[in-house]
Amino acid sequence: MTLALRLGSTLLSLCVGSAASALTIEYARDRAPDLVKCDQLAYRGQRAEATACFTGLTATSTDSRIKADAARASGDVRAANGFFQAALKEYPKDAAVRTRWGELFAATHQNNEAVKLFQEALELDENYAPAKLGLAKVAAGRFDEKAKELADEVIEKAPDSAIEAYLLLARTELEDGALADAEAKLGKALAIAEREKITPLEIYALKASADLLHDKADSAWTPKALALDKAYGDIYATPAYFYVITRRYREAIELYRKAVEIQPDNYAAHQELGVNLLRQNKVDEAQQHLMIAYRGDPYSAPIVNTLRLIDSFEHFVVSPHPPVDVKAPDGSTVRTPGVILRLHKDEAPVIEPYVLDLANRAIATYTKRYGFELKEPVVVELYPEHDDFAVRTSGLPGIGLLGVTFGYLVAMDSPTGRADADFHWGTTLWHEMAHVFTLEATKHLVPRWFSEGVSVYEEWTTGPLPGRHIPLTVIQAIKEDKFLPIAELDRGFIRPTYEAQVIVSYMQAGLTCEYISKRWGQEGLERMLDRYAAGQDTGAAIQAALSIPPETFDKDFRAFVEGELGKVTGQFEDWQKAQGDAHKAARAGEWQPAAESAGKAVELFPDYVDEGSPYLVRARAQRELGDADAATATLLEYRRLGGHDPDALISLAKALGTANRTADAIAVLKDALMVAPLREEVHSELADRLTAAERPAEAAVEYQALIAMNPHDLADARYRLAKAYFAAGERDKSREQLLYALEIAPHFREAQQLLLEIVR
């Protein structure tokens, strides 16, 4: 980008208003002495004096570079931007100017512009450490491995002065759980700080974080930091961040409260406090802190997006449901703690009974399977707009997740948040409810891989449409031997090194839990949870719970995967060819070759029921060839293995109904509800089948859902609901629905006759 362009419209967002910021520690060795004097005041907690010092430099200095940095330090973004423009004109070859300006962009959440400036600085001086570290910090914010590479380069060039590089590496290693490595880096950083007389405040905050990750909440580094600066809020906010990334949100809230108490202008801490309060369903208090954060940092997209999301809650219905007795799979009864639903008002009348039923069944199932009773109601939120759900999760749109769990709160896409064929909302809710148990049973100490593994395994085995689903990218990864050692599996979720590694890690985790269950029984999974609750890491948990060292576990697990999927991976290319041939023949209307190729693909990879499944091609070909019974058998097998294409399920239900297999048709239509509960056809078909099966109370639920969708023939829907109520012995409700039907269609003869019968 040229200088002229940068001085134009791309800077408009930096030219409005000002932003106060929390304490920023400057490590650059080429910082002007006048600025360093002001810095020292800030590091001693003399914030007002420091601001006056910076403001004075802005007014009196004749160097535009100092003016720019002073304005930035005092929080005057607009003035700083103008001074940086002037400084770049005066000093076009100064790498420091571009780097400092890049830091201003980064501080106002405009990372793309910041990166361009850091790169330009490196074009002027390829070894300029602050520019490399600017790039590294942006990369670290994205959990990009490039951050470590850049920090290592800085250390390699000048190990005796690379304090900021050591701190960046220490932070990433703390994120990865490599505590010993992080503490070694912090030791080197502290030695430099003591030698160079650099404030150790950030070092102390990271050392306190390391103590926290060692389960030592009362760190000696906290009072050390407060002795230097009694208003240093990050001594609490930095450790709180590590609570958040390990999903201990309640503990994080307490630390963020302390951070804003001693440093009310720590707007980043207010933001995180608000976000985490929202994760605990404390909406009003969350909004208060987010508003404070917005006043101090109006450039933060997560703050703005989350405040808008809270405003949108007026379009949602919150419905508390009391504890109920639910039958568990083993026949025993479980008392649930209650469920609170937050559903969009346009969807709640249709989907509420299904969401509530599934949530309660999940609670009963997991209570018995994992021997843990929930202590409070579970909040379940469904969002019809995927970007709203994404903001609920991370403050930003565009994430690829389907659901997320924050302990006793589950948020996810609603059935309209994704296309029907791609999204099985029932399985997603079942997956997230398993997280409630693994998180709460371990006080949120469970590593991500095990929590995700249990959830995936439960999807496959106890979910509303069970069946093992292994994406094709994962089959390829298994062929390429890309599974991680069990002790390192969390890394695949947190810091992936190739594009598909996150989904590969999900599937490896699910297969791992399946392996544990098959070899050690359900008790093996329970013992693992107990070990995590006791604070053990994965290596120790494997040894203690399963009496096997992690290295042997890895070897045996590899043999398990080979036994389960080795045939598929060995024939993967043959399967791909058969699959391709089947679809090609189907597109050409050549149904006999399509049926044959699809049959071969099914034989080579019988579990594959996801997008483009050969079962669907085979069933279509069989119908076209006039063999309806074979098509029905193919779709029954597809459904048994977890296939959930709604059109396929509806077609199967109709075929079963035609064959007078009413009970089977009902079961299939109930599966369809777990994918497409907002399709009128599903409710209409299911209600009629339930009526035919003399199950009027269940039929009434489906007719109510149909009416809530405002069908084309509303009078007929009201009449059919009235018949269901009448059959169930609820004559008052039947009469009410008949009156509604006759109000719409006064000459509706059948409704008149039924009303007359009720009156008599």
Image (spheres, rainbow, N blue to C red):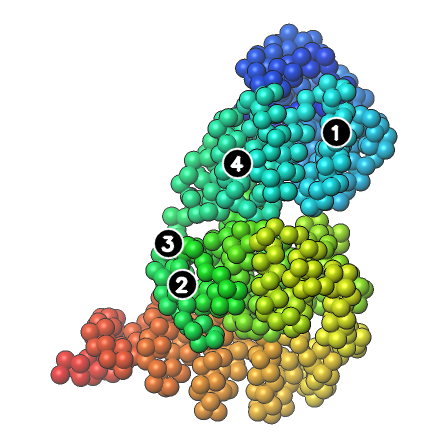
Q: Out of 156 and 386, give the one closest to the viewer.
A: 156
Q: Answer with left or right where residue 469 lies relative to residue 118.
A: left
Label 2 vs label 3: CA separation? Answer: 19 Å
Which residue type does callout 3 highlight? Val
Question: Quarter holding the N terminus?
Answer: top right
- Looking at marks 2 and 1 on the same chain, the residue that comes earlier in the sequence is marked by 1
Query: Circle 3 — which element?
Result: strand
Q: Are marks 2 and 3 in contact (CB under 8 Å)?
A: no
Between marks 2 and 3 in the image, the one whose residue lies nearer the viewer: 2
Give me the residue at 53% from left, 62% from top. 434
- Looking at marks 2 and 4 on the same chain, the residue that comes earlier in the sequence is marked by 4
Q: Out of 236 and 394, give the one closest to the viewer.
A: 236
Task: Characterize the local packing of mark 3: few (<14), some (14-19) or many (20 or more) Cα atoms within 10 angstroms.
Answer: some
Q: Residue furthest left?
A: 760
Where does the image place residue 685, in percent across and percent down from the top left?
42, 79
Label 2 vs label 1: CA separation? Answer: 51 Å
Which residue type does callout 2 highlight? Thr
Q: Out of 722 and 8, give the one closest to the viewer.
A: 722
Between marks 4 and 3 in the image, the one whose residue lies nearer the viewer: 4
Q: Answer with left or right where residue 518 lies relative to residue 248.
A: right
Q: Which mark is residue 336?
A: 2
Q: Is residue 203 above or below residue 249?
A: above
Between marks 3 and 1 in the image, the one whose residue lies nearer the viewer: 1
Q: Which residue is mark 3?
A: 318
Q: Which residue is mark 1?
A: 189
- Looking at marks 1 and 4 on the same chain, the residue that comes earlier in the sequence is marked by 1
Q: Which residue is mark 4?
A: 255
Give me the residue at 61% from left, 30% from top. 220
